[in-house]
Image (cartoon, rainbow, N blue to C red):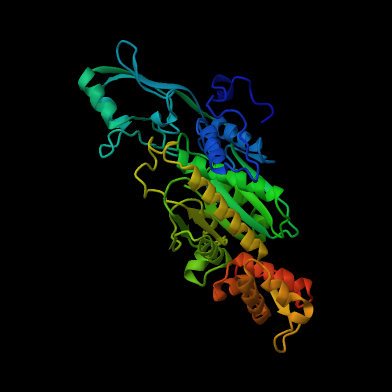
Amino acid sequence: MEGRPADTQAARYPRPVSPADAPVSIEPHDADLGESLHAFVAQLLPFRRCITGDGLRQTLLAIGERVPLRISEVPTGTRVFDWTIPKEWRVRDAYVATADGTRVIDWAESPLHLVQYSVAARDRMPLWALRDHLHTLPDQPGLVPYRTSYYAPTWGFCLSHEELERLAAEVGEGGELEVVVDAEQAPGSLTYGEVVIPGETSDEILLSAHACHPALANDNASSLAVATVLARRLMDGSPLRHTVRVLFAPGTIGALAWLDRNHATLGRIRHGLVLANLGDAGGLTYKQTRRGTFDVPLPIDRAVRTVARDLGVPLDIRPFEPTGYDERQFGSPGLDLPVGRLTRTPHGEYPEYHTSGDDLALVRPESLAKSLAALEAIVRTLDGDAVYRNAQPFGEPQLGRRGLYASLGGLPDGPAAQRAALWVLNLSDGAHSLLDVAERSGLPFATVRAAADRLADAGLLVAPSSPSGDGR
């Protein structure tokens, strides 16, 4: 961002102040992790995010205070597949005022009040004429809707239906109102950020959270917070075999820009998840990968199911369809990447979705913490999956002679550890993975992985290979 003029939106509208504006602790073993995550959501919420602009950059810079974020700028006019990076949207002010100058709709109060990418407008008009540019939710009269018009030049305001009725009662349909949208669309760039956590191999696990919706806590500040803290925990935890990449990009156009710029290395992606809506009170919902829906489930599809079983949390599994978030970009036919989507309540299925009701009260600390725990377990399961060969495949090896039988029996989960050892030995035929063992045996993946480690240390397993993550 070097060379940007000083008179930018960031200068005119400095970083918002909130009760959680101080750096939030995200220590890996924080006993109050749910509260810390909730505070992080509160810190991210005031930034006026859009698909371009300084609100997006402020969000990424806040994330970059906690993890080593690499920020990329893609200039206006750049072709990304069939799309073109749009001009950057910059807003100075926007409001609707009565004749005495009282602002009845004010962008300064909330970015939801202005349709995103509204073009400049300055006029006086009666309420009946202005209605064509006003958006409300008659069925949810107390809420302000979130509306966008990224690629169609127009302008508009959003307000609650109750506010519109009060305005009509005050000024009448013929009452004159002042309309100001002091905004421009100018050459600039689209911004995205990514954290890369190096592993022992270049095989990648991709996690993606869209970073473009303003003033919405569950969609999408919750996933930004959870993904950031997950990246920190993975960095500070035990070494990984896979490289993990966490992408923070604007929805659709941001994902397309990243995919276009990284087209040559997409073959490294073995597993992936799009993350969204991770803070509400609903159970987990998983949308399968494209190939896992139309062919056979891929490791990511199976790992999510296994982790939910191991954690004892309800999981709603749904097939892939070409709607939703950025999984439809990763799963487009020319790419067909092994990327599913993990949410709590999916988009459009909770009444506060894309409204002012998607606030901090909707996001629960315990839900954020449980989402984080599930995601970390999914990553560790994918990373720990491997295919072994039994070094003593003729009959059952004598575990007691190697001191294993007694040691397994002495573990807190002794019976399960013994069963896991026998299952691992039997399915270590070069064709089955540890995930296969966990699924077939019904044992927790962590128990299976621990058994494999003990057997390998005893020389009973031949060095593992990574299962084919993308099914190719």
Q: Is residue 360 left or right of residue 298?
A: left
Residue that lies at the very extreme toward the top in this rendered image: 100
Placement of 406 over or under 77, stated as above or below: below
Quarter of the view holding residue 206: bottom right
Residue 400 placement, left or right of 184: right
| Residue at 44% from the left image edge and 46% from the top image edge | 280
6 relative to 341, above or below: above
Q: Residue, x 39% and y 37% (percent of image)?
A: 147
Decide which of 227, 296 is in the foreground and name it: 227
> The N terminus lies in which quarter of the figure?
top right
**Residue 169 makes an appearance in the image:** yes
Residue occupying image coordinates x 59% and y 74%? 436
Q: In this view, does 304 lie above or below 233?
A: below
| Number of numbered discs | 0
- Taking 439 as reference, is 151 left or right? left
Tell me, yes or no, if residue 52 can be seen here: no
Tell me residue 189's x, y (percent).
Answer: 59, 35
Picture coordinates of residue 29 (x, y %)? 64, 46
Residue 424: x and y, percent?
66, 76
Quadrant position of residue 232: top right
Observer-nearest of 346 and 443: 443
Residue found at x 74% / y 80%: 400
Residue 419 location (% of width, % of height): 62, 76
**Location of the C terminus (image quadrant):** bottom right
